[in-house]
C-alpha cells in the first residue's frame, strides 16, 4: 500500500486506499515522472482532473459505494492519460487512452 500524502485530514487528505501502483509501458515512456506523481496525488485526494461533471459525480458515488475510480489528466504535451483505481482498492493503474 502506498501513501503519497500525509494523512492529516482536511481538504487535501487522501479519500481512499490506492493499493499497488501500476504504470503501463506506454505511460512510463511518455509521461514525465513529476506529472505522474502530481496526478497520483490529485487522484488520491479526489481531484478527478479533466472529467465531465457527470463522471466526477460517479466517482464521488463510487467512493461511498466501493466502485471503480477514474481520473483523466494531461501530460507535459497536453495529451490525456488515465488513472484508474479498481473497486477493490487493490490496484491503481496509470495508462494511456490507447492502452485502456
Image (cartoon, rainbow, N blue to C red):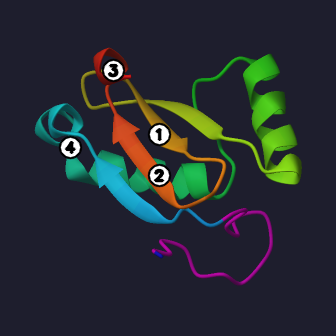
Q: CA distance from mark 3 to mark 1?
A: 15 Å
Provide residue 13's location: percent of width, then percent of height. 70, 70
Provide residue 19's location: percent of width, then percent of height. 50, 66
Q: CA distance from mark 3 to mark 2?
A: 22 Å
Residue positioned 66% across, 41% down in the render:
68
Q: CA distance from mark 2 to mark 4?
A: 18 Å
Kindly identify which numbered label has been placed on residue 32: 4
Label 2 CA crowd tier, 10 Å (few <14, some 14–19, many 20+):
many
Kindly identify which numbered label has been placed on residue 92: 2
Tell me if 10 is positioned left or right of 89 in this view. right
Residue positioned 66% across, 57% down in the render:
45
Instruction: Mark 3 or mark 1: name the one nearer the start of the chain.
Output: 3
SS for dot 1: strand
Q: Nearer the viewer, residue 4 or 88?
A: 88
Task: Using the rendered view, name the quadrant where residue 32 is placed.
Answer: top left
Instruction: Mark 2 or mark 1: name the one nearer the start of the chain.
Output: 1
SS for dot 2: strand
Kindly identify which numbered label has been placed on residue 11: none
SS for dot 4: loop
Query: In the rendered image, which residue does mark 1 sit on?
Result: 83
Q: CA distance from mark 3 to mark 4?
A: 12 Å
Query: In the rendered image, which residue does mark 3 sit on?
Result: 78
Q: CA distance from mark 2 to mark 1?
A: 7 Å
Provide residue 35's location: percent of width, then percent of height. 32, 46
Compared with 51, 8 (above or below) is below
Amino acid at each position: 500500500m502506498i501513501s503519497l500524502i500525509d494523512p492529516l485530514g482536511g481538504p487535501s487528505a487522501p479519500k481512499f486506499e490506492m493499493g499497488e501502483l501500476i504504470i503501463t509501458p506506454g505511460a512510463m515512456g511518455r509521461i514525465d515522472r513529476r506529472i505522474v506523481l502530481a496526478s497520483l496525488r490529485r487522484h488520491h485526494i479526489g481531484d478527478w482532473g479533466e472529467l465531465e461533471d457527470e463522471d466526477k459525480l460517479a466517482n464521488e458515488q463510487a467512493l461511498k459505494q466501493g466502485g471503480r475510480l477514474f481520473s483523466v489528466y494531461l501530460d507535459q504535451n497536453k495529451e490525456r492519460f488515465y488513472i484508474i483505481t479498481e473497486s477493490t482498492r487493490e490496484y491503481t493503474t496509470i495508462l494511456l487512452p490507447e492502452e485502456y
